[in-house]
Image (cartoon, rainbow, N blue to C red):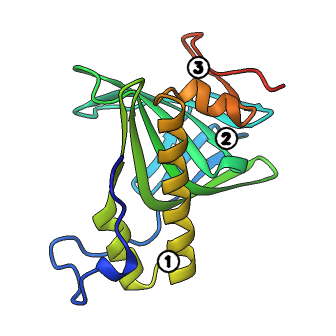
């Protein structure tokens, strides 16, 4: 299990090597089939609203490492569960963004909380982007209370994944969530 940074471990001087990034806020406009990111607007191949959230599938055009992306936005769990289709070997099985997710009308919004978890199915999970998280706290993009809440969420996710053998299906199933991916793979167990 990865060790999470503490607010006290943040250096007192600003991080010169990684300046603080403003919060990443992504919007999904279902009617326009458009994914608004910090780098532009991308066309979406598929949106599907389901009981636990929103499924998204889109291509990555001219990206050096990634061919396509699928994700499930899960508001109740505060997660965006991503699967990337890489041009080369798979780098990880799932990328989990810790986030606040809201839906208003036909627009879904994902506000990223900086800490993310990489999952190698059945093997391990690891927290990443700790430097971005600490820089964001220092810059005031997250309050101390928000930062602690994100840390607690990350710790709970790591513990839960470990308890379920780093099996996303089992972890999500324990929360009553089942996910369907475009290739027909099923992740999670049916809710009781």
When asked about the image quadrant of residue 114, the answer is bottom left
Percent x, y of residue 124: 36, 34
Tell me the element at label 1: loop
Between the C-alphas of marks 2 and 3, the distance is 22 Å
**133 up-or-down from 137: above or below:** above
Q: Check disc 2 and report the residue beneath it.
A: 32
Quadrant position of the C terminus in the picture? top right
Give the quadrant of residue 104: bottom right
Q: In this image, 102 relative to 148: left or right?
A: right
Residue 23 vertical position relative to residue 101 in the rendered view, above or below: below
Q: Secondary structure at mark 3?
A: loop
- What secondary structure is marked by label 2? loop
Quick one: which residue is furthest to the left in this view?
A: 17
Q: Residue at x 29, y 79 (%)?
A: 10
Q: Residues within 10 Å of mark 3 (few under 14, many from 20)?
A: some
Q: What residue is pinned by disc 3?
A: 181
Residue for point 28% across, 34% down: 63
Instruction: Tell me how far mark 3 sits from mark 1, CA to CA.
Output: 32 Å
Report x, y in % for residue 8. Answer: 35, 82
The count of marks equals 3
Q: Which residue is mark 1?
A: 142
The answer to the question of whether label 3 and label 1 lie on touching residues, with beta carbons closer than 8 A, is: no
Mark 2 and mark 3 residues within 8 Å of each other at the beta carbon: no
Residue sitting at x 38%, y 84% = 139
Q: Tell whether 78 sits left or right of 124.
A: right
Give the class, few, some or many, for how many residues have Cα within 10 Å of label 2's Cα (few <14, many ≥20): few
């Amino acid at each position: 299990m990865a060790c999470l940074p503490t607010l006290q471990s943040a250096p007192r001087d600003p991080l010169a090597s990684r300046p603080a990034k403003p919060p990443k806020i992504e919007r999904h406009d279902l009617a326009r089939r458009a994914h608004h990111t910090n780098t532009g607007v991308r066309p979406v191949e598929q949106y599907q609203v389901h009981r636990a959230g929103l499924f998204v599938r889109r291509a990555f055009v001219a990206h050096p490492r990634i061919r396509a992306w699928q994700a499930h936005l899960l508001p109740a769990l505060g997660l965006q569960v991503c699967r990337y289709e890489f041009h080369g070997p798979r780098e990880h099985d799932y990328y989990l963004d810790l986030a606040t997710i809201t839906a208003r009308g036909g627009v879904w919004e994902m506000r990223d909380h900086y800490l993310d978890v990489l999952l190698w199915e059945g093997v391990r999970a690891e927290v990443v982007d700790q430097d971005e998280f600490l820089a964001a706290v220092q810059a005031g993009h997250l309050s101390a209370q928000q930062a602690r809440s994100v840390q607690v969420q990350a710790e709970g996710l790591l513990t839960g994944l470990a308890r379920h053998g780093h099996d996303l299906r089992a972890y999500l199933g324990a929360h009553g969530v089942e996910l369907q991916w475009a290739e027909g793979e099923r992740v999670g167990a049916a809710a009781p």
